[in-house]
Amino acid sequence: MAALSGKQCKTAKEDVAVQAKLDEYEKLIGKLTVKLSKLKKRSISERRALGVYL
């Protein structure tokens, strides 16, 4: 049926590879989110120490 509609069928191996890549990206996003949060907190505390308020 998929061949008739012009869509390519993915194999189970391709599905696993795609899912692994998605998992890797989600992990990276999580790490970057934590890092950004820490940088924001540090920036705020440094501005307060300098007496700079925005």
Image (cartoon, rainbow, N blue to C red):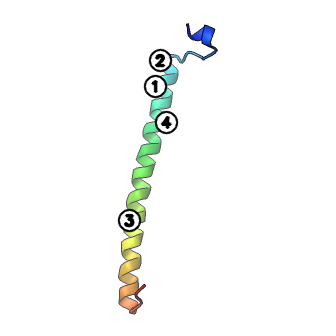
Q: Is residue 27 left or right of residue 13?
A: left
Residue type at mark 3?
Ser
User: Observer-nearest residue: 42 or 7?
Assistant: 7
Which residue is drawn at the image coordinates 46% and 25% (left, top)?
A: 16
Residue 28 drawn at (x, y percent): 45, 49
CB under 8 Å between discs 2 and 1: yes
Cα separation between marks 2 and 4: 14 Å
Type of the residue with mark 1: Val
Alpha-carbon span between mark 4 and mark 1: 9 Å
The residue indicated by pointer 1 is 16
Question: Is residue 17 positioned above or below 34 on the image?
Answer: above
Q: CA distance from mark 3 to mark 4?
A: 24 Å
Which mark is on residue 8? none
Q: Secondary structure at mark 4?
A: helix
Label 1 element class? helix
Nearer-N-terminus badge (3/4): 4
Q: Which badge, 2 or 4, comes first in the chain's sequence?
A: 2
- Quickly name the residue at label 4: 21
> Counting residues from the N terminus, which is met first, the one under dot 4 or under dot 1?
1
Q: Label 4: how many residues lie within 10 Å, few (<14), some (14-19) or many (20+)?
A: few
Nearest to the observer: residue 21 or residue 6: 6
Seen from the viewer's position, the closer of residues 53 and 37 is 53
Q: Residue at x 49, y 36 (%)?
A: 21
Q: Looking at the image, tell me whether mark 3 or mark 2 is earlier in sequence order.
A: 2
Q: Which residue is tagged 2?
A: 12
Q: Which residue is mark 3?
A: 37
How far apart are the alpha carbons under marks 3 and 1? 32 Å
Type of residue at label 2? Ala
Whichever of callouts 3 and 1 sits on the residue coming sooner in the sequence is 1
| Image location of residue 7, percent across then percent down | 60, 17
Quarter of the figure with residue 49: bottom left
Mark 4 touches mark 1? (CB < 8 Å): no
